[in-house]
Image: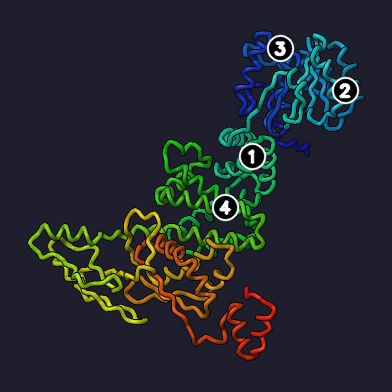
Protein backbone atom coordinates (compact mmCIF):
# COMPACT_ATOMS: atom_id res chain seq x y z
CA UNK A 1 0.00 0.00 0.00
CA UNK A 2 1.50 3.33 -1.10
CA UNK A 3 1.83 6.14 1.39
CA UNK A 4 -0.88 8.76 0.94
CA UNK A 5 0.31 12.30 0.23
CA UNK A 6 -2.14 15.10 0.90
CA UNK A 7 -3.13 17.16 -2.12
CA UNK A 8 -1.64 20.35 -0.67
CA UNK A 9 1.83 18.72 -0.85
CA UNK A 10 1.29 16.51 -3.88
CA UNK A 11 0.12 19.37 -6.10
CA UNK A 12 2.35 22.09 -4.67
CA UNK A 13 3.53 24.33 -7.55
CA UNK A 14 7.09 23.77 -8.72
CA UNK A 15 7.21 26.61 -11.28
CA UNK A 16 6.03 30.18 -11.34
CA UNK A 17 3.58 29.32 -14.13
CA UNK A 18 1.81 26.79 -11.91
CA UNK A 19 1.28 29.21 -9.01
CA UNK A 20 -2.44 29.99 -8.72
CA UNK A 21 -3.81 33.51 -8.32
CA UNK A 22 -0.53 35.47 -7.98
CA UNK A 23 0.33 36.23 -11.60
CA UNK A 24 1.44 39.83 -10.98
CA UNK A 25 3.94 38.83 -8.29
CA UNK A 26 5.35 35.85 -10.18
CA UNK A 27 5.78 37.98 -13.30
CA UNK A 28 7.73 40.57 -11.28
CA UNK A 29 10.01 37.92 -9.80
CA UNK A 30 10.63 36.31 -13.20
CA UNK A 31 11.51 39.70 -14.71
CA UNK A 32 13.94 40.36 -11.86
CA UNK A 33 15.65 37.01 -12.62
CA UNK A 34 15.66 37.68 -16.37
CA UNK A 35 17.19 41.15 -15.99
CA UNK A 36 19.53 40.05 -13.17
CA UNK A 37 18.02 42.63 -10.80
CA UNK A 38 18.03 40.53 -7.67
CA UNK A 39 17.62 42.25 -4.32
CA UNK A 40 19.39 41.02 -1.22
CA UNK A 41 16.19 40.78 0.87
CA UNK A 42 12.50 40.16 0.10
CA UNK A 43 9.43 40.19 2.31
CA UNK A 44 6.50 38.00 1.23
CA UNK A 45 3.36 38.84 3.22
CA UNK A 46 -0.27 37.80 2.91
CA UNK A 47 -2.94 35.41 4.27
CA UNK A 48 -2.24 31.77 4.98
CA UNK A 49 -2.12 29.28 2.16
CA UNK A 50 -1.69 31.72 -0.74
CA UNK A 51 1.80 30.61 -1.87
CA UNK A 52 4.35 32.70 0.05
CA UNK A 53 6.73 29.89 1.02
CA UNK A 54 6.09 28.10 -2.28
CA UNK A 55 7.14 31.17 -4.31
CA UNK A 56 10.22 31.59 -2.08
CA UNK A 57 11.31 28.00 -2.82
CA UNK A 58 10.66 28.35 -6.56
CA UNK A 59 12.61 31.61 -6.60
CA UNK A 60 15.55 30.01 -4.75
CA UNK A 61 15.51 27.02 -7.11
CA UNK A 62 15.46 29.12 -10.30
CA UNK A 63 18.29 31.50 -9.36
CA UNK A 64 20.58 28.51 -8.66
CA UNK A 65 19.55 26.52 -11.75
CA UNK A 66 22.47 26.03 -14.14
CA UNK A 67 20.35 25.49 -17.29
CA UNK A 68 17.35 27.77 -17.29
CA UNK A 69 14.63 27.12 -19.88
CA UNK A 70 13.58 29.64 -22.50
CA UNK A 71 10.76 30.74 -20.14
CA UNK A 72 13.31 31.24 -17.34
CA UNK A 73 12.03 28.30 -15.32
CA UNK A 74 14.18 25.67 -13.57
CA UNK A 75 15.30 22.76 -15.76
CA UNK A 76 14.90 20.09 -13.02
CA UNK A 77 17.87 18.26 -14.55
CA UNK A 78 21.01 20.02 -13.36
CA UNK A 79 22.73 19.02 -10.11
CA UNK A 80 21.29 21.98 -8.19
CA UNK A 81 17.70 21.25 -9.29
CA UNK A 82 18.02 17.53 -8.55
CA UNK A 83 19.40 18.26 -5.08
CA UNK A 84 16.55 20.67 -4.45
CA UNK A 85 13.91 18.19 -5.60
CA UNK A 86 15.38 15.48 -3.36
CA UNK A 87 15.47 17.81 -0.37
CA UNK A 88 19.26 17.73 0.10
CA UNK A 89 20.26 21.11 -1.29
CA UNK A 90 22.72 23.08 0.82
CA UNK A 91 21.98 26.28 -1.06
CA UNK A 92 18.53 26.73 0.46
CA UNK A 93 18.12 27.14 4.21
CA UNK A 94 14.72 27.39 5.90
CA UNK A 95 14.28 28.74 9.41
CA UNK A 96 11.03 28.66 11.38
CA UNK A 97 11.04 31.91 13.33
CA UNK A 98 8.08 30.77 15.42
CA UNK A 99 10.30 28.32 17.31
CA UNK A 100 13.72 29.95 16.66
CA UNK A 101 13.00 33.50 17.67
CA UNK A 102 15.79 34.33 20.08
CA UNK A 103 18.98 36.33 19.72
CA UNK A 104 21.16 33.19 19.80
CA UNK A 105 19.23 31.68 16.88
CA UNK A 106 19.85 34.78 14.77
CA UNK A 107 23.55 34.78 15.72
CA UNK A 108 23.87 31.19 14.49
CA UNK A 109 22.18 32.27 11.24
CA UNK A 110 24.62 35.16 10.87
CA UNK A 111 27.58 32.80 11.30
CA UNK A 112 26.11 30.48 8.69
CA UNK A 113 25.62 33.30 6.18
CA UNK A 114 29.39 33.72 5.83
CA UNK A 115 29.75 30.26 4.22
CA UNK A 116 29.52 30.47 0.39
CA UNK A 117 27.34 28.01 -1.57
CA UNK A 118 28.79 24.68 -2.76
CA UNK A 119 26.73 24.54 -5.95
CA UNK A 120 25.28 27.49 -7.76
CA UNK A 121 25.66 31.21 -7.13
CA UNK A 122 23.42 32.00 -4.16
CA UNK A 123 22.66 30.83 -0.65
CA UNK A 124 18.98 31.57 -0.01
CA UNK A 125 17.70 31.88 3.56
CA UNK A 126 13.92 31.54 3.91
CA UNK A 127 12.68 32.71 7.32
CA UNK A 128 9.04 31.75 7.81
CA UNK A 129 6.73 33.54 10.30
CA UNK A 130 9.37 36.24 10.72
CA UNK A 131 7.02 38.42 12.77
CA UNK A 132 7.54 35.98 15.70
CA UNK A 133 11.16 37.14 16.20
CA UNK A 134 11.81 38.94 19.45
CA UNK A 135 12.84 42.58 19.61
CA UNK A 136 16.41 41.60 20.40
CA UNK A 137 16.53 39.13 17.52
CA UNK A 138 15.29 41.79 15.10
CA UNK A 139 17.98 44.19 16.26
CA UNK A 140 20.67 41.52 15.95
CA UNK A 141 19.50 40.76 12.42
CA UNK A 142 19.46 44.36 11.15
CA UNK A 143 23.10 44.80 10.08
CA UNK A 144 23.37 41.45 8.28
CA UNK A 145 20.02 41.99 6.57
CA UNK A 146 21.09 45.39 5.24
CA UNK A 147 24.60 44.37 4.05
CA UNK A 148 24.76 40.60 3.59
CA UNK A 149 27.54 38.83 1.63
CA UNK A 150 27.12 38.92 -2.17
CA UNK A 151 26.07 35.28 -2.28
CA UNK A 152 23.33 35.59 0.39
CA UNK A 153 19.66 36.38 -0.32
CA UNK A 154 17.05 36.58 2.45
CA UNK A 155 13.36 35.84 1.86
CA UNK A 156 11.16 36.65 4.86
CA UNK A 157 7.59 35.33 4.95
CA UNK A 158 4.84 36.47 7.31
CA UNK A 159 1.08 36.61 7.70
CA UNK A 160 1.19 39.70 9.94
CA UNK A 161 3.26 42.43 8.33
CA UNK A 162 2.10 45.04 10.86
CA UNK A 163 4.08 43.26 13.61
CA UNK A 164 7.42 43.71 11.84
CA UNK A 165 9.46 46.70 12.95
CA UNK A 166 9.90 49.53 10.39
CA UNK A 167 13.67 49.14 10.28
CA UNK A 168 13.24 45.62 8.88
CA UNK A 169 10.58 46.74 6.38
CA UNK A 170 12.86 49.49 5.04
CA UNK A 171 15.59 46.95 4.21
CA UNK A 172 13.44 44.62 2.08
CA UNK A 173 11.40 44.55 -1.10
CA UNK A 174 7.80 43.93 -0.02
CA UNK A 175 5.47 41.65 -2.01
CA UNK A 176 1.84 41.54 -0.87
CA UNK A 177 0.14 38.28 -1.80
CA UNK A 178 -3.61 38.39 -2.50
CA UNK A 179 -6.30 36.01 -1.39
CA UNK A 180 -7.00 33.49 -4.14
CA UNK A 181 -10.34 34.16 -5.78
CA UNK A 182 -13.15 31.62 -5.73
CA UNK A 183 -12.99 31.22 -9.51
CA UNK A 184 -9.24 30.43 -9.44
CA UNK A 185 -9.72 28.03 -6.54
CA UNK A 186 -12.54 26.18 -8.33
CA UNK A 187 -10.44 25.86 -11.52
CA UNK A 188 -7.52 24.41 -9.58
CA UNK A 189 -9.77 22.01 -7.69
CA UNK A 190 -11.19 20.82 -11.03
CA UNK A 191 -7.63 20.10 -12.18
CA UNK A 192 -6.80 18.19 -9.00
CA UNK A 193 -10.09 16.24 -9.22
CA UNK A 194 -9.36 15.25 -12.82
CA UNK A 195 -5.87 14.08 -11.85
CA UNK A 196 -7.25 12.03 -8.97
CA UNK A 197 -10.13 10.55 -10.98
CA UNK A 198 -12.80 12.25 -8.88
CA UNK A 199 -16.13 13.34 -10.38
CA UNK A 200 -16.88 16.67 -8.66
CA UNK A 201 -19.94 18.91 -9.01
CA UNK A 202 -19.05 22.55 -9.75
CA UNK A 203 -21.46 23.83 -7.08
CA UNK A 204 -19.78 21.52 -4.58
CA UNK A 205 -16.33 22.86 -5.49
CA UNK A 206 -17.68 26.41 -5.15
CA UNK A 207 -18.75 25.71 -1.57
CA UNK A 208 -15.28 24.31 -0.82
CA UNK A 209 -13.69 27.46 -2.31
CA UNK A 210 -15.94 29.72 -0.24
CA UNK A 211 -15.16 27.77 2.92
CA UNK A 212 -11.40 28.04 2.31
CA UNK A 213 -11.57 31.86 2.53
CA UNK A 214 -8.98 32.51 -0.18
CA UNK A 215 -6.40 29.91 0.93
CA UNK A 216 -5.49 27.20 -1.56
CA UNK A 217 -3.98 24.96 1.11
CA UNK A 218 -7.24 25.05 3.07
CA UNK A 219 -9.22 24.30 -0.11
CA UNK A 220 -7.10 21.23 -0.91
CA UNK A 221 -7.34 20.00 2.67
CA UNK A 222 -11.15 20.28 2.57
CA UNK A 223 -11.13 18.55 -0.82
CA UNK A 224 -9.26 15.58 0.66
CA UNK A 225 -11.70 15.49 3.57
CA UNK A 226 -14.73 15.38 1.24
CA UNK A 227 -13.15 12.67 -0.90
CA UNK A 228 -12.64 10.57 2.22
CA UNK A 229 -16.34 11.09 3.06
CA UNK A 230 -17.99 10.58 -0.33
CA UNK A 231 -15.48 8.60 -2.39
CA UNK A 232 -14.76 9.39 -6.02
CA UNK A 233 -17.97 11.37 -6.58
CA UNK A 234 -18.43 14.70 -4.83
CA UNK A 235 -21.93 16.19 -4.84
CA UNK A 236 -23.28 19.46 -3.51
CA UNK A 237 -25.26 17.65 -0.82
CA UNK A 238 -22.15 15.75 0.35
CA UNK A 239 -20.25 19.00 0.80
CA UNK A 240 -22.92 20.90 2.76
CA UNK A 241 -23.51 17.83 4.95
CA UNK A 242 -19.84 17.26 5.72
CA UNK A 243 -18.94 20.93 6.21
CA UNK A 244 -22.14 21.77 8.10
CA UNK A 245 -23.01 24.52 5.61
CA UNK A 246 -26.53 25.93 5.27
CA UNK A 247 -28.13 25.05 1.96
CA UNK A 248 -28.94 27.89 -0.46
CA UNK A 249 -32.47 26.49 -0.61
CA UNK A 250 -33.29 27.71 2.90
CA UNK A 251 -32.43 31.30 2.02
CA UNK A 252 -34.35 31.22 -1.26
CA UNK A 253 -37.42 29.91 0.57
CA UNK A 254 -37.08 32.55 3.27
CA UNK A 255 -36.95 35.45 0.81
CA UNK A 256 -40.01 34.05 -0.99
CA UNK A 257 -41.80 33.93 2.38
CA UNK A 258 -40.80 37.54 3.09
CA UNK A 259 -42.23 38.71 -0.22
CA UNK A 260 -45.53 36.91 0.47
CA UNK A 261 -45.71 38.20 4.09
CA UNK A 262 -45.74 34.62 5.42
CA UNK A 263 -44.50 35.16 8.97
CA UNK A 264 -45.35 31.64 10.18
CA UNK A 265 -43.48 30.00 7.30
CA UNK A 266 -40.35 32.08 7.97
CA UNK A 267 -40.40 31.13 11.66
CA UNK A 268 -40.87 27.43 10.84
CA UNK A 269 -37.92 27.48 8.43
CA UNK A 270 -35.77 29.11 11.11
CA UNK A 271 -36.87 26.48 13.63
CA UNK A 272 -35.91 23.72 11.17
CA UNK A 273 -32.48 25.29 10.75
CA UNK A 274 -31.95 25.36 14.52
CA UNK A 275 -33.10 21.72 14.82
CA UNK A 276 -30.33 20.74 12.40
CA UNK A 277 -27.73 22.18 14.77
CA UNK A 278 -26.90 25.44 13.03
CA UNK A 279 -26.03 28.50 15.09
CA UNK A 280 -28.51 31.38 14.89
CA UNK A 281 -25.69 33.91 14.51
CA UNK A 282 -24.28 31.93 11.61
CA UNK A 283 -27.77 31.85 10.09
CA UNK A 284 -28.35 35.61 10.28
CA UNK A 285 -24.91 36.23 8.76
CA UNK A 286 -25.72 33.86 5.90
CA UNK A 287 -29.08 35.58 5.35
CA UNK A 288 -27.31 38.95 5.07
CA UNK A 289 -24.92 37.48 2.51
CA UNK A 290 -27.83 36.01 0.54
CA UNK A 291 -29.67 39.36 0.46
CA UNK A 292 -26.46 41.05 -0.66
CA UNK A 293 -26.07 38.52 -3.48
CA UNK A 294 -29.66 39.10 -4.58
CA UNK A 295 -29.02 42.86 -4.58
CA UNK A 296 -25.91 42.62 -6.80
CA UNK A 297 -27.99 40.60 -9.29
CA UNK A 298 -30.37 43.54 -9.73
CA UNK A 299 -27.86 45.27 -11.99
CA UNK A 300 -26.12 43.41 -14.87
CA UNK A 301 -22.95 45.38 -14.18
CA UNK A 302 -22.60 43.96 -10.65
CA UNK A 303 -23.51 40.33 -11.39
CA UNK A 304 -19.77 39.63 -11.69
CA UNK A 305 -19.53 40.20 -7.91
CA UNK A 306 -21.59 37.04 -7.37
CA UNK A 307 -19.23 34.10 -6.71
CA UNK A 308 -21.44 31.04 -7.12
CA UNK A 309 -21.98 28.24 -9.64
CA UNK A 310 -23.90 28.71 -12.89
CA UNK A 311 -27.08 26.97 -11.67
CA UNK A 312 -27.24 28.96 -8.44
CA UNK A 313 -26.49 32.17 -10.34
CA UNK A 314 -29.65 31.72 -12.44
CA UNK A 315 -31.74 31.29 -9.30
CA UNK A 316 -30.29 34.49 -7.88
CA UNK A 317 -31.16 36.34 -11.08
CA UNK A 318 -34.75 35.10 -10.97
CA UNK A 319 -35.24 36.05 -7.33
CA UNK A 320 -33.65 39.46 -7.93
CA UNK A 321 -36.41 40.21 -10.47
CA UNK A 322 -39.06 39.49 -7.82
CA UNK A 323 -37.47 41.60 -5.07
CA UNK A 324 -37.96 45.40 -5.05
CA UNK A 325 -34.78 47.34 -4.46
CA UNK A 326 -36.26 49.19 -1.47
CA UNK A 327 -37.14 45.84 0.11
CA UNK A 328 -33.54 44.62 -0.23
CA UNK A 329 -32.10 47.81 1.27
CA UNK A 330 -34.42 47.67 4.28
CA UNK A 331 -33.92 43.91 4.68
CA UNK A 332 -30.13 44.32 4.73
CA UNK A 333 -30.43 46.99 7.40
CA UNK A 334 -32.63 44.74 9.56
CA UNK A 335 -30.29 41.74 9.27
CA UNK A 336 -27.22 43.90 9.88
CA UNK A 337 -28.79 45.41 13.03
CA UNK A 338 -29.67 41.91 14.23
CA UNK A 339 -26.09 40.78 13.62
CA UNK A 340 -24.69 43.72 15.59
CA UNK A 341 -27.06 43.21 18.54
CA UNK A 342 -26.74 39.42 18.66
CA UNK A 343 -23.83 39.21 21.09
CA UNK A 344 -25.39 41.57 23.65
CA UNK A 345 -28.88 40.11 23.43
CA UNK A 346 -30.05 37.93 26.33
CA UNK A 347 -32.73 36.19 24.26
CA UNK A 348 -30.90 35.54 21.02
CA UNK A 349 -33.54 33.37 19.40
CA UNK A 350 -36.23 35.99 20.01
CA UNK A 351 -33.96 38.66 18.52
CA UNK A 352 -33.61 36.66 15.28
CA UNK A 353 -37.32 35.82 15.19
CA UNK A 354 -38.25 39.49 15.58
CA UNK A 355 -35.96 40.28 12.66
CA UNK A 356 -37.71 37.62 10.55
CA UNK A 357 -41.12 39.05 11.49
CA UNK A 358 -40.03 42.54 10.45
CA UNK A 359 -38.66 41.18 7.19
CA UNK A 360 -41.97 39.42 6.51
CA UNK A 361 -43.87 42.69 6.92
CA UNK A 362 -41.74 44.93 4.70
CA UNK A 363 -43.65 44.42 1.46
CA UNK A 364 -47.00 44.47 3.30
CA UNK A 365 -46.21 47.93 4.69
CA UNK A 366 -45.15 49.08 1.24
CA UNK A 367 -48.42 47.88 -0.32
CA UNK A 368 -50.41 49.62 2.39
CA UNK A 369 -48.51 52.85 1.87
CA UNK A 370 -49.04 52.76 -1.90
CA UNK A 371 -52.75 52.02 -1.50
CA UNK A 372 -53.34 55.18 0.50
CA UNK A 373 -54.32 58.04 -1.79
CA UNK A 374 -53.63 61.65 -0.83
CA UNK A 375 -56.96 63.51 -0.44
CA UNK A 376 -57.77 66.50 -2.59
CA UNK A 377 -58.30 69.69 -0.52
CA UNK A 378 -61.87 71.04 -0.40
CA UNK A 379 -60.75 74.37 -1.86
CA UNK A 380 -59.50 72.61 -5.00
CA UNK A 381 -62.83 70.81 -5.39
CA UNK A 382 -64.69 74.09 -5.07
CA UNK A 383 -62.53 75.69 -7.77
CA UNK A 384 -63.12 72.79 -10.13
CA UNK A 385 -66.83 72.87 -9.45
CA UNK A 386 -67.01 76.62 -10.10
CA UNK A 387 -65.73 76.09 -13.65
CA UNK A 388 -68.92 74.15 -14.51
CA UNK A 389 -72.60 75.03 -14.38
CA UNK A 390 -73.10 73.23 -11.08
CA UNK A 391 -73.91 75.23 -7.94
CA UNK A 392 -71.11 76.07 -5.54
CA UNK A 393 -70.75 74.86 -2.00
CA UNK A 394 -71.35 77.65 0.50
CA UNK A 395 -70.65 77.88 4.18
CA UNK A 396 -73.29 79.56 6.24
CA UNK A 397 -72.03 82.53 8.25
CA UNK A 398 -73.83 81.42 11.39
CA UNK A 399 -71.42 78.52 11.74
CA UNK A 400 -69.26 79.18 14.80
CA UNK A 401 -65.75 78.05 15.53
CA UNK A 402 -66.84 75.92 18.44
CA UNK A 403 -69.20 73.92 16.22
CA UNK A 404 -68.10 70.60 14.82
CA UNK A 405 -68.36 70.60 11.04
CA UNK A 406 -68.31 67.77 8.54
CA UNK A 407 -66.17 68.48 5.53
CA UNK A 408 -67.10 67.24 2.12
CA UNK A 409 -65.49 64.68 -0.15
CA UNK A 410 -61.89 64.26 -1.09
CA UNK A 411 -62.32 62.72 -4.52
CA UNK A 412 -65.20 63.11 -6.99
CA UNK A 413 -65.83 63.82 -10.69
CA UNK A 414 -65.87 67.40 -11.86
CA UNK A 415 -69.56 67.21 -12.74
CA UNK A 416 -70.69 65.97 -9.32
CA UNK A 417 -72.82 68.41 -7.35
CA UNK A 418 -71.21 69.04 -3.99
CA UNK A 419 -73.81 68.93 -1.23
CA UNK A 420 -74.04 71.76 1.23
CA UNK A 421 -71.95 71.33 4.37
CA UNK A 422 -74.25 70.99 7.32
CA UNK A 423 -73.21 72.00 10.80
CA UNK A 424 -73.85 69.76 13.74
CA UNK A 425 -74.42 71.50 17.06
CA UNK A 426 -71.93 70.69 19.74
CA UNK A 427 -73.19 68.18 22.27
CA UNK A 428 -71.75 67.46 25.65
CA UNK A 429 -69.68 64.26 25.57
CA UNK A 430 -71.42 62.87 22.51
CA UNK A 431 -69.94 62.01 19.14
CA UNK A 432 -71.09 64.17 16.19
CA UNK A 433 -72.79 62.37 13.34
CA UNK A 434 -71.64 62.86 9.78
CA UNK A 435 -74.14 63.96 7.14
CA UNK A 436 -75.23 61.19 4.76
CA UNK A 437 -73.73 61.75 1.31
CA UNK A 438 -73.84 59.71 -1.91
CA UNK A 439 -71.84 56.43 -1.87
CA UNK A 440 -69.38 57.73 -4.45
CA UNK A 441 -68.22 60.45 -2.08
CA UNK A 442 -65.74 59.59 0.63
CA UNK A 443 -66.33 61.50 3.85
CA UNK A 444 -63.69 62.74 6.23
CA UNK A 445 -64.88 64.36 9.43
CA UNK A 446 -63.13 67.34 10.98
CA UNK A 447 -63.56 68.40 14.56
CA UNK A 448 -63.02 72.09 15.27
CA UNK A 449 -62.45 72.62 18.97
CA UNK A 450 -62.31 75.78 21.01
CA UNK A 451 -59.32 78.07 20.33
CA UNK A 452 -57.58 77.12 23.57
CA UNK A 453 -57.84 73.43 22.70
CA UNK A 454 -56.67 73.69 19.11
CA UNK A 455 -53.09 72.73 18.33
CA UNK A 456 -51.67 73.48 14.91
CA UNK A 457 -49.25 70.93 13.51
CA UNK A 458 -45.68 72.16 13.84
CA UNK A 459 -43.85 72.96 10.63
CA UNK A 460 -46.72 71.67 8.51
CA UNK A 461 -46.31 72.35 4.82
CA UNK A 462 -49.64 70.88 3.68
CA UNK A 463 -52.89 69.69 5.18
CA UNK A 464 -53.08 65.91 5.53
CA UNK A 465 -56.39 64.11 5.80
CA UNK A 466 -55.66 60.37 5.53
CA UNK A 467 -58.07 57.95 7.10
CA UNK A 468 -56.92 55.64 9.89
CA UNK A 469 -58.33 52.77 11.91
CA UNK A 470 -58.75 52.36 15.65
CA UNK A 471 -55.90 49.85 15.54
CA UNK A 472 -53.61 52.40 13.87
CA UNK A 473 -54.51 54.97 16.52
CA UNK A 474 -53.76 52.57 19.36
CA UNK A 475 -50.45 51.49 17.82
CA UNK A 476 -49.17 55.06 17.35
CA UNK A 477 -50.51 56.07 20.79
CA UNK A 478 -48.42 53.33 22.44
CA UNK A 479 -45.36 54.11 20.32
CA UNK A 480 -45.36 57.72 21.61
CA UNK A 481 -44.13 56.35 24.94
CA UNK A 482 -40.82 55.41 23.28
CA UNK A 483 -40.16 59.09 22.52
CA UNK A 484 -40.33 60.16 26.20
CA UNK A 485 -38.14 57.62 28.07
CA UNK A 486 -37.68 59.95 31.07
CA UNK A 487 -41.38 60.57 31.73
CA UNK A 488 -42.14 57.44 33.76
CA UNK A 489 -45.57 58.51 35.05
CA UNK A 490 -46.83 59.56 31.62
CA UNK A 491 -45.49 56.35 30.05
CA UNK A 492 -47.38 54.34 32.67
CA UNK A 493 -50.56 56.29 31.92
CA UNK A 494 -50.21 55.84 28.13
CA UNK A 495 -49.66 52.10 28.43
CA UNK A 496 -52.65 51.61 30.77
CA UNK A 497 -55.17 53.98 29.14
CA UNK A 498 -55.95 53.47 25.48
CA UNK A 499 -57.69 56.16 23.41
CA UNK A 500 -61.29 55.72 22.27
CA UNK A 501 -62.09 57.23 18.91
CA UNK A 502 -65.36 59.10 18.37
CA UNK A 503 -67.10 57.39 15.42
CA UNK A 504 -66.77 59.02 11.99
CA UNK A 505 -64.39 61.70 13.28
CA UNK A 506 -60.63 62.03 13.75
CA UNK A 507 -61.22 62.98 17.41
CA UNK A 508 -60.58 60.58 20.25
CA UNK A 509 -61.22 60.60 24.00
CA UNK A 510 -58.99 59.68 26.91
CA UNK A 511 -60.01 59.33 30.55
CA UNK A 512 -58.17 60.52 33.61
CA UNK A 513 -58.86 59.78 37.26
CA UNK A 514 -57.24 62.68 39.11
CA UNK A 515 -55.76 66.14 38.77
CA UNK A 516 -52.18 64.87 38.60
CA UNK A 517 -52.94 62.85 35.49
CA UNK A 518 -54.74 65.82 34.00
CA UNK A 519 -51.67 67.99 34.56
CA UNK A 520 -49.36 65.37 33.00
CA UNK A 521 -51.53 64.81 29.92
CA UNK A 522 -52.23 68.51 29.33
CA UNK A 523 -48.52 69.26 29.60
CA UNK A 524 -47.77 66.86 26.72
CA UNK A 525 -50.98 67.35 24.77
CA UNK A 526 -49.34 69.39 22.02
CA UNK A 527 -46.53 66.83 21.62
CA UNK A 528 -48.99 63.92 21.60
CA UNK A 529 -51.16 65.52 18.93
CA UNK A 530 -48.22 66.50 16.73
CA UNK A 531 -46.87 62.93 16.97
CA UNK A 532 -50.22 61.35 16.13
CA UNK A 533 -50.89 63.77 13.25
CA UNK A 534 -47.46 63.16 11.76
CA UNK A 535 -47.53 59.36 11.97
CA UNK A 536 -51.18 58.91 11.01
CA UNK A 537 -50.92 61.62 8.29
CA UNK A 538 -54.04 63.45 9.45
CA UNK A 539 -53.83 67.09 10.47
CA UNK A 540 -57.33 67.11 12.05
CA UNK A 541 -56.69 64.67 14.86
CA UNK A 542 -57.80 66.10 18.21
CA UNK A 543 -57.96 64.81 21.78
CA UNK A 544 -60.68 65.25 24.41
CA UNK A 545 -59.67 64.73 28.05
CA UNK A 546 -62.47 63.48 30.34
CA UNK A 547 -62.42 63.13 34.13
CA UNK A 548 -63.71 59.78 35.39
CA UNK A 549 -65.09 60.62 38.86
CA UNK A 550 -66.29 57.04 39.44
CA UNK A 551 -62.79 55.61 39.79
CA UNK A 552 -62.33 56.94 43.30
CA UNK A 553 -60.50 53.97 44.77
CA UNK A 554 -57.85 54.02 42.05
CA UNK A 555 -57.06 57.73 42.19
CA UNK A 556 -53.46 58.81 42.56
CA UNK A 557 -53.70 61.76 44.95
CA UNK A 558 -51.48 64.78 44.89
CA UNK A 559 -49.86 66.00 48.13
CA UNK A 560 -52.49 68.76 48.38
CA UNK A 561 -55.35 66.27 47.94
CA UNK A 562 -53.86 64.04 50.62
CA UNK A 563 -53.58 67.01 52.98
CA UNK A 564 -57.20 68.01 52.45
CA UNK A 565 -58.43 64.49 53.17
CA UNK A 566 -56.34 64.27 56.35
CA UNK A 567 -57.45 67.74 57.48
CA UNK A 568 -61.11 66.80 56.99
CA UNK A 569 -60.65 63.83 59.30
CA UNK A 570 -58.54 65.73 61.86
CA UNK A 571 -59.03 69.56 61.92
CA UNK A 572 -56.15 69.90 64.40
CA UNK A 573 -53.81 69.24 61.49
CA UNK A 574 -54.66 72.69 60.08
CA UNK A 575 -53.55 74.40 63.31
CA UNK A 576 -50.34 72.36 63.34
CA UNK A 577 -49.50 73.31 59.77
CA UNK A 578 -50.31 76.97 60.39
CA UNK A 579 -48.30 77.10 63.59
CA UNK A 580 -45.22 75.52 62.06
CA UNK A 581 -45.65 77.50 58.82
CA UNK A 582 -45.30 74.37 56.64
CA UNK A 583 -45.74 74.51 52.89
CA UNK A 584 -47.29 71.70 50.84
CA UNK A 585 -44.92 70.52 48.07
Give the crowd class for mark 1: few <14, some 14-19, many >=20 residues within 10 Å: some
In the picture, the quarter occupied by the C terminus is: bottom right
Mark 2 → mark 3, Cα distance in angstroms: 23 Å
Q: Position of residue 284 (x, y in %)?
A: 58, 53
Give the crowd class for mark 4: few <14, some 14-19, many >=20 residues within 10 Å: few
At numbered mark 2, what does the secondary structure look like: helix, strand or loop? helix
Q: Total label count?
A: 4
Q: Which residue ends up furthest to the left in the rendered image? A: 389
391 and 359: which one is in front? 391
Taking 73 as reference, is 383 above or below it?
below
Mark 4 → mark 1, Cα distance in angstroms: 24 Å
Q: Earlier in the sequence, mark 2 or mark 4?
A: 2
The residue sitting at 41% across, 71% down in the picture is 543
Residue assigned mark 1: 213
Q: Position of residue 105 (x, y in %)?
A: 89, 25
Taking 197 as reference, is 556 above or below it?
below
Residue assigned mark 4: 337
Residue assigned mark 3: 38
At numbered mark 1, what does the secondary structure look like: helix, strand or loop? loop
Q: Earlier in the sequence, mark 1 or mark 2?
A: 2
Mark 4 touches mark 1? (CB < 8 Å): no
Amino acid sequence: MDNFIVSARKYRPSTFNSVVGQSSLTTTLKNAITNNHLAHAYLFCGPRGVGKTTCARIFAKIINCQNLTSEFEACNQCESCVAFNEGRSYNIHELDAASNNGVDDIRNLIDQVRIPPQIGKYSVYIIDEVHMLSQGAFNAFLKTLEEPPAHAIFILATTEKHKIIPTILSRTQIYDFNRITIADTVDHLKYVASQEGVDADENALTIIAQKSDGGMRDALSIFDQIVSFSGNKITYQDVITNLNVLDYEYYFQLVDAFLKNEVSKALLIFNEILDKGFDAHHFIGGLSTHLRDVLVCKDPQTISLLEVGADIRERYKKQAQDCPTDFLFQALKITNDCDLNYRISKNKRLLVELALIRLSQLTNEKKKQLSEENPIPLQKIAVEASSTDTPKTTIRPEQKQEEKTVQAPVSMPNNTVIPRVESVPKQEKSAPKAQQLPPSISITAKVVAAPQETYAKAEATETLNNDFTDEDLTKVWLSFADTIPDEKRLISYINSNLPKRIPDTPTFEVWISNSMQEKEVNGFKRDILNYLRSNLKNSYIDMIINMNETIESYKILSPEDKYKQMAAQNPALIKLRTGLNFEID
